[in-house]
Image (cartoon, grey):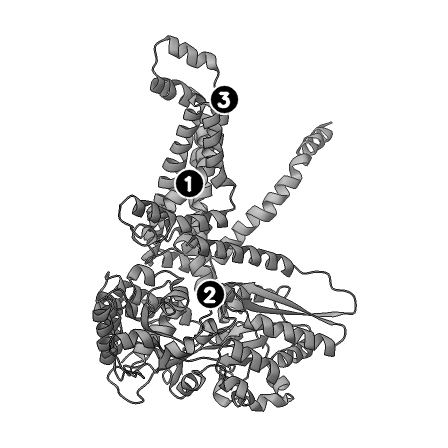
Amino acid sequence: MLLSHRARQLVRYLPVLPAVLLLLVFLAGPVLWAFQASLTNAGLTGRSARNPEWVGLENYQRLLTDPVFPLSLGLTVLFVGGSAVLGQNLLGLAIAVLMRRARPAVASLVGTAVVAAWVLPEIVAAFAAYAYFSKDGTLNQLLGALGFGRPEWLYAFPMVAVMLANVWRGTAFSMLVYKAALNDVPTEVTEAAQMDGARGWQRLLFITLPMIRGSIATNLMLITLQTLAVFTLVWVMTAGGPANASTTLPILAYQEAFKFGDIGYGTAVASVLILIGAAFGVVYIRLLKEPRA
Amino acid sequence: MRHRALKNMSLFAAALVALAACSPGTPDEGSKTLKVAYQKTDSFTALDTMFQSAKEEFEAANQGVTVELQPIHGNDDDYGTKLALALRSPSTAPDVFYEDTFKVRSDVDAGYLLKLDSHLEGWEDWDKYDDAAKAAGRADDGGTYAVPLGTDTRAIWYNKKVLAAAGISEPWQPRSWQDILDAARKIKANDPSAIPFNMYAGKGTGEGTVMQGFYELLYGTGSSLYDEESKKWVVGSAGFKDSLGFLKTLYDEQLAVTPAEALDANVWKKVFGEWFPDGKLGATVEGSYAPSFWQKGGSYEWPGYEQDMGVAPFPTQNGDAPGAVSMSGGWTLAVGAETKEPDLAFKFLSTALNQKNSLAFTVESSQIAVRTDVAADPGYQDANPFVKDVSDLVKVTRYRPATSDYPRISAAVQEATEAVITGSRTPEQAAADYDAAVTDIVGGDKTVRK
């Protein structure tokens, strides 16, 4: 009886088995491989490509003394904080809220324009952004026509340019999440608040936002992790330059592993990136789990 | 700009298609397949042409063997990365591939390349290669692992019209760095909108920064990057600081492009495609392959470039002997160490590099011949009016130290030039940063103060 009960329980997990296997092979596998490689001096070429040696934590010690690493870490935080947590998140929310009040024609027009950037493959979006911000690009032609200066965005303000590009590209996702969430807020509640004399912003702050808290946390988690991993956009626009001024962690990992052929050190950078992503993930999941007040 | 973005996009799309075509098919029973990996870009198709013709020739002569061409679309850096990744696993490693001379030694260390000595013995054409070129494929153990395709040199390319307008007589031959500055200032005074004398700098142009720029300066000061005798890297040299100082002068006095333009990885396209043909640029240091861009069928066709352009050796700092500096690189063909068909692979390599194919490739890509029978061919000598001038530079040319530390050292040099032209460090500070970086990379016992 006991056995059959246990067996039945096992059978219950059977449907998720393929998913778990896929996750193990394609997610846990590479993560473990990266972590293992970060403890060796594996190289792309040269003697260490044939016989990588175990070097323990040497790569991580090197990270601590590498002047580019803290810079890169700071830039990554700036990039994620500025373009995802603030930029995409707030802009997406604002557009979703405003769209509920706009005329249907305007709303669908805005929606299409925002989603268009998101539909583009990353490489195409990256080239479009490069063309927009480059010296003779669209932005400078517009500014020039209006009589303003023509700053070299990608050279003088590389982080501003890549952050704006990431906001442009990613806002659609937040907008869609919030649009769906707002549709689920029962109208009776907001109407009741209206009856009590709550103004628009009060209704948003005290009624709507607490009610979509779950969606906010989910959205923040997804866009944070997505933005942490952004590589193509930055690589195409600035390649991390000038003088490392836009070298976020994925760029640093790529440069170390593939440009300098130091796979061990590159995977150490990547492992740190994984840990940061995991930390964010844990925080957001806790946020999700807390019982609703 | 938009246009360029479009071009890049289409290039990428083409790369995707090509990569999709690279996925291994199931070979028919009994037939053999040779995989050939090489670089192809929108401005470099000469190699593709060569392999297409070699494939036809080879398949006709060897029934049952299929040659699978796998062009990799990308710049030199990306090609190198892609190739190295493919070489890591026997299942993806190509049988024959295009290999940069300065990566031969480290790839031999990694066990990626097949030793060709026994195959070369039976190949009568091998005697036609000149000895200096043969050395490019030789590793530390004395064995030969790669067969050179061609080589190149670097020189000053100048626009005669721009120089003439500033009253500089032709042929222009600067004898020292001062002569270059004098001429550049004259051009600037005559036409403030012109770019008098550009030299690449910064990390954007990658190896171009050092090969077509910094090393011409450094090796003209009597200093060097690497001491071949003691096998140690040189730090603290006055020549290094002087070279950075020269770049600082060029950029500070706006005799070169703006620092922002210099850091754009695509600046060389403007040099060849816009500034020289439009008469905006006085002179620059570039490779002997420059005419390949301008000649008929090149990516920036420029009828009449033969009349408008001139070439001059880059001078030493104060005109000391030998009076000129040049740098050489070049590419080779190699056979993968894990190939299942070493004999067939070498046979294909020798077909690709036979006199006919070598000649066509050398002419189309404006390379300097490494085979004596190609060098003697009138088709090569008359390919463009500059062949003799740039070939003569082989006498003074230098090669990069091809150790596995080199890519990092090169990056440190590029960083030093970037810091100087953007004004974030003085030449002395940047040189000190470089010394620290080198010591960090190779260890203090592998450096020598000179």
Classify residue B142 as left or right of residue B61.
Answer: left
Q: Which amino acid type is marked by label 2? A: Asp
Dividing the picture into quarters, in which one does residue A14 lie? top right
Chain containing mark 3: A
Q: Is residue A242 visible?
A: yes
Q: Which residue is mark 1?
A: A168
Q: Which residue is mark 3?
A: A183
Q: Secondary structure at mark 3?
A: helix
Does A184 appear above or below B344? Answer: above
Q: Which amino acid type is marked by label 3? A: Asn
Classify residue A242 as left or right of residue A55.
Answer: left
Query: Mark 3 and mark 1: span between their CA atoms?
Result: 24 Å
Q: Secondary structure at mark 1?
A: helix
Q: Are marks 3 and 1 on the same chain?
A: yes
Q: Which residue is mark 2?
A: B77
Chain containing mark 1: A
Dividing the picture into quarters, in which one does residue B345 lie? bottom right
Dividing the picture into quarters, in which one does residue B264 lie? bottom left
Classify residue A114 as left or right of residue B246.
Answer: right
Query: Mark 2 and mark 3: span between their CA atoms?
Result: 50 Å
Q: Are marks 2 and 3 in contact (CB under 8 Å)?
A: no
- Quarter holding the C terminus of chain A is top left
